[in-house]
Image (cartoon, helix red, strand yellow):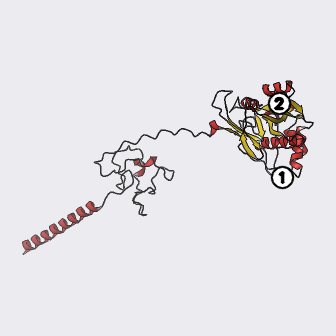
């Protein structure tokens, strides 16, 4: 139904088949668990090392060749009887190099767990749950669980000393299957996927260190306020630092601007005002302050009327004097 990536860190990818849960890893382990249960119904958990998943599957029809490319080593699946404490130790080794890559990083089915990559190696696993009768319950450290994996891992490959010890003690058993055939049959058979392959991420493996929110940054230092006695500059915030239309020019869209649509607050003085500092009187060619607010016109109009009236009075007096002189 979609491309099932097999990512590695780098080249633009922030996740890896050797460090993170992946859709393809979930598909592989789901197949392992389902097919192991057919012969050993008590099997509860499947584990697949990320280094053993070697290729992606393209969207569309899946060929046998693609399946073999995903699992090219022909490893025989095995089952092992392990305690909850041994499972924890396996998971600790799985994430010992996290968040960096590790070929022994284990993909899982039948269980989920959380860990903290910021903690000391060997003490990272926070919680473990196993799916029993479609319900997730805590894994008990002293209880024995049946786990299936491939024979490479089951014999201690990738440094899994727990599996090596269990193998030496006879607790690891070959189940007579081939891993890539398990995957092929699981995708095809009607009781499983019936040809519709669409795995998803399910939160089976979670690093709580990556889930924790980052600490809030310190608030920005407030701008030095303008002299409260300056009536022409009531807003001390510099216009160029405000979010606007992206070109550094105040478009009048901020609350409080005198934006009457006639362009009177867009004077040519804006370009000059950008280099001014807070607290200065900003006046461009249209008598704007730094917020682009037009100065009040009331006083100007009053003085204009007084001057005009004085001129009329003087003109009238001059005319009267002129006429008397002529008479």
Total marks placed? 2
In front here: 100 or 225? Answer: 100
Q: Is residue 66 visible?
A: no
Q: Identify the residue at image location x=30%, y=47%.
A: 228
First of labels 1, 2 by sequence position? 2
Q: Secondary structure at mark 2?
A: helix
Q: Which residue is mark 1?
A: 196
Q: Secondary structure at mark 1?
A: loop
In front here: 290 or 236? Answer: 236
In front here: 102 or 220? Answer: 102
The image shows residue 244 at horizontal and vertical percentages of: 49, 52
Residue 146 falls in image quadrant: top right
> Which one is in front in this view, the residue at disc 1 or the one at disc 2?
2
Q: Is residue 26 visible?
A: yes
Name the residue at the bottom extreme: 327
The image shows residue 220 at horizontal and vertical percentages of: 45, 41
Residue 4 falls in image quadrant: top right
The image shows residue 326 at horizontal and vertical percentages of: 8, 73
Q: Which residue is mark 2?
A: 153
Q: Are marks 1 and 2 in contact (CB under 8 Å)?
A: no
In front here: 234 or 130? Answer: 130
Q: Is residue 119 left or right of residue 51?
A: left
The image shows residue 296 at horizontal and vertical percentages of: 31, 59
User: How dense is the environment of label 1, judged by Cα within 10 Å: few (below 14), some, or many (20 and up)?
Assistant: few
Q: Marks 1 and 2, how far apart in space?
A: 29 Å
Q: Identify the residue at image location x=90%, y=44%.
A: 64
User: How dense is the environment of label 2, judged by Cα within 10 Å: few (below 14), some, or many (20 and up)?
Assistant: many
Q: Is residue 84 left or right of residue 188?
A: left
Residue 11 falls in image quadrant: top right
């Amino acid at each position: 139904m979609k491309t099932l990536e097999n990512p590695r860190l780098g080249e633009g990818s922030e996740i890896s088949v050797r460090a993170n849960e992946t859709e393809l890893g979930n598909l592989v382990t789901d197949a392992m668990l389902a097919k192991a249960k057919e012969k050993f119904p008590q099997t509860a958990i499947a584990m697949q090392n990320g280094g053993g998943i070697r290729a992606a599957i393209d969207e569309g029809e899946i060929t046998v060749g693609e399946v073999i490319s995903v699992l090219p080593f022909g490893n025989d699946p095995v089952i092992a009887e392990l305690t909850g404490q041994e499972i924890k130790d396996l998971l600790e080794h799985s994430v010992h190099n996290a968040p960096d890559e590790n070929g022994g990083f284990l993909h899982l089915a039948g269980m989920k767990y959380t860990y903290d990559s910021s903690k000391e190696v060997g003490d990272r696993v926070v919680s473990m749950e196993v799916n029993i009768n479609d319900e997730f319950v805590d894994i008990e450290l002293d209880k024995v669980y049946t786990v299936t994996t491939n024979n490479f891992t089951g014999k201690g490959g990738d440094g899994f000393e727990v599996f090596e010890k269990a193998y030496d003690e006879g607790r690891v058993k070959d189940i007579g299957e081939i891993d890539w055939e398990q995957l092929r049959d699981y995708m095809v058979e009607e009781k499983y996927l019936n040809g519709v392959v669409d795995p998803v991420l399910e939160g089976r493996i979670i690093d709580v260190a990556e889930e924790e929110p980052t600490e809030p940054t310190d608030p920005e230092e407030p701008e030095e306020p303008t002299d409260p006695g300056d009536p022409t500059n009531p807003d001390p915030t510099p216009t160029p630092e405000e979010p606007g239309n992206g070109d550094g020019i105040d478009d009048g869209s901020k609350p409080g601007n005198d934006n009457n649509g006639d362009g009177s607050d867009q004077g040519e003085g804006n370009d000059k005002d950008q280099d001014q500092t807070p607290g200065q009187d900003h006046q461009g060619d249209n008598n704007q302050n730094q917020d682009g607010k037009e100065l009040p016109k009331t006083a100007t109009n009053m003085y204009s009327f007084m001057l005009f009236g004085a001129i009329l009075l003087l003109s009238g007096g001059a005319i009267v004097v002129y006429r008397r002189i002529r008479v």
